[in-house]
Image: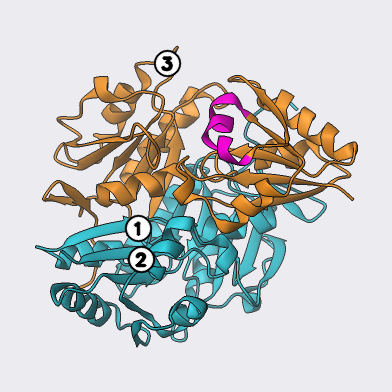
Chain colours: A cyan, B orange
Amino acid sequence: MAKLYVVGIGPGGKEHMTQKALETIKRSDVIVGYTFYIELINDFLEGKKVISTGMKGELERCKAAIEEVKNGFDTCIISTGDPGLYGMAGPILEMADGIEVEVIPGVSAAFCGASELGAPIMHDFCTISLSDLLTPWELIEKRLDLAAEADFVIALYNPKSMGRQTQIERAVEIIKRHKKGSTPVGLIKNAGREGNEKRVYTLDTIDFDFIDMMTVVVIGNSKTYINNDKIITPRGYSI
Amino acid sequence: MAKLYVVGIGPGGKEHMTQKALETIKRSDVIVGYTFYIELINDFLEGKKVISTGMKGELERCKAAIEEVKNGFDTCIISTGDPGLYGMAGPILEMADGIEVEVIPGVSAAFCGASELGAPIMHDFCTISLSDLLTPWELIEKRLDLAAEADFVIALYNPKSMGRQTQIERAVEIIKRHKKGSTPVGLIKNAGREGNEKRVYTLDTIDFDFIDMMTVVVIGNSKTYINNDKIITPRGYSI
């Protein structure tokens, strides 16, 4: 029987794909994804049926993928990063009653970005998406406040979009209720793929103009420091 | 000049290693790691110098790896999962002044475990390690409390060890101040590698005896539900 694979391709550069993601894409009949992500794996698509749609076409893509499986074709629906974090695993499992689904994990943007910034995560951390398309903004504010109070390292996903420009400034304002202005902040644009750029700031000096929808923002905890332009959060060893 | 690579090998199964992790290990002269992790990549070690030490030998391994690079050998120090989350990237960057270091990200245990449980993460989430070897227990309790209040999906790392058996029960008690007893909980032992076992419970029914040091505990948010033994956290789409 045909199967639906929800595949995390990692941040986009082929070198960060897992063996399993690569092999699953290679032996599937149909590949479904957001147009920009499909381009990232263009090398592996020869001879396959490709279904790509634009932004906000998530549910349309899920339906198309499920339809292909019901017609007997092994199908991959792809997410960048890990499909289980703000990706396609959830909606597929919500919709896909009666067909077999396998989720294939990948390297999430926060970890790839962190690896380029040094070791800013290292300890207890959280991810918060600033997109209020699917989550009430009040809940996002509450999470920002409590996460900062808990002294988590915080990775912010979707800090801006075309229509959303100011939430990141508001988020930093909330975080500064609990974290010092000198807390290191790493900005990574296009982590782990072409167009990759990084910047190291603090909560007080952060350049909001640098941030766009492809940027991940990593904010340290109370022990995080900067050394030679690398951000380091100590694990706690006596070094 | 020789270089030090801090390599995330993912959860352990070769299929979850990235291309970059695999290729970096293959072309390095020296591989340093915890004995159990070295065994996971045994197929790639022929002709290489291997330095492995037992548990709690973290700093010893870092020193050995830095020494090899100073002697001119390209060296990998390996972590399971991602080296930037509770891994070797931090201590290496704290100790490795004067040598070139590259961190290579990997698939973390929480994401691999989540992929086997369904889609339990999907939304804003946090990781908390219950090991109080390097972190005061009071801070861990504070984070558990605030994370539960913020309605994060919570992934607990290091829920038990040989000498630490009761903290996981205390952690669940704290989390239940804010989360309902019916909140789904996934337990994954040896996620993404041999010996893999999973169980689906709720906060009220969780089997503490199943949990050991190789288990990741994933606790849902207020929207998480169980369907056909899969744990699903909705992203928020109207489905």
Instruction: Decide if residue A34 is on the left or right side of residue A214.
Output: left
Instruction: Decide if residue B199 is on the left or right side of residue B76.
Output: left
On the question of residue B235 being in view, the answer is no
Residue at the spot 48% in from the left edge and 57% down from the top edge:
A19
> Residue A87, which numbered label?
2
Q: Kindly state the secondary structure of the residue where label 1 is placed.
A: loop
Rate crowding at label 2 as few (under 14), some (14 to 19) or many (20 or more) other CA atoms within 10 Å: many
Rate crowding at label 1 as few (under 14), some (14 to 19) or many (20 or more) other CA atoms within 10 Å: many
**Same chain, marks 3 and 2?**
no
Instruction: Decide if residue B165 is on the left or right side of residue A64.
Output: right
x%, y% of residue B58?
66, 26
Question: Magenta region, mostly helix, strand or loop?
Answer: helix
> Residue A84, which numbered label?
1
Q: Kindly state the secondary structure of the residue where label 2 is placed.
A: loop
Q: What is the CA distance from the residue labelled 1 to the residue labelled 2?
A: 5 Å
x%, y% of residue A180?
64, 50
Q: Kindly state the secondary structure of the residue where label 3 is placed.
A: loop
Residue at the spot 59% in from the left edge and 31% down from the top edge:
B38
Read off the magenta span: B34-44
Residue labelled with disc 3: B164
Marks 1,2: beta carbons within 8 A: yes
Q: What is the CA distance from the residue labelled 3 to the residue labelled 1?
A: 30 Å
Q: Nearer the viewer, residue B187 or B169?
A: B187
Image height of A101 relative to B61, above or below: below
Instruction: Decide if residue B27 is on the left or right side of residue A166.
Output: right
Q: Quadrant of the C terminus of chain A?
A: top right
Residue at the spot 39% in from the left edge and 47% down from the top edge:
B112
Marks 3,1: beta carbons within 8 A: no
- Amino acid of disc 3: Arg
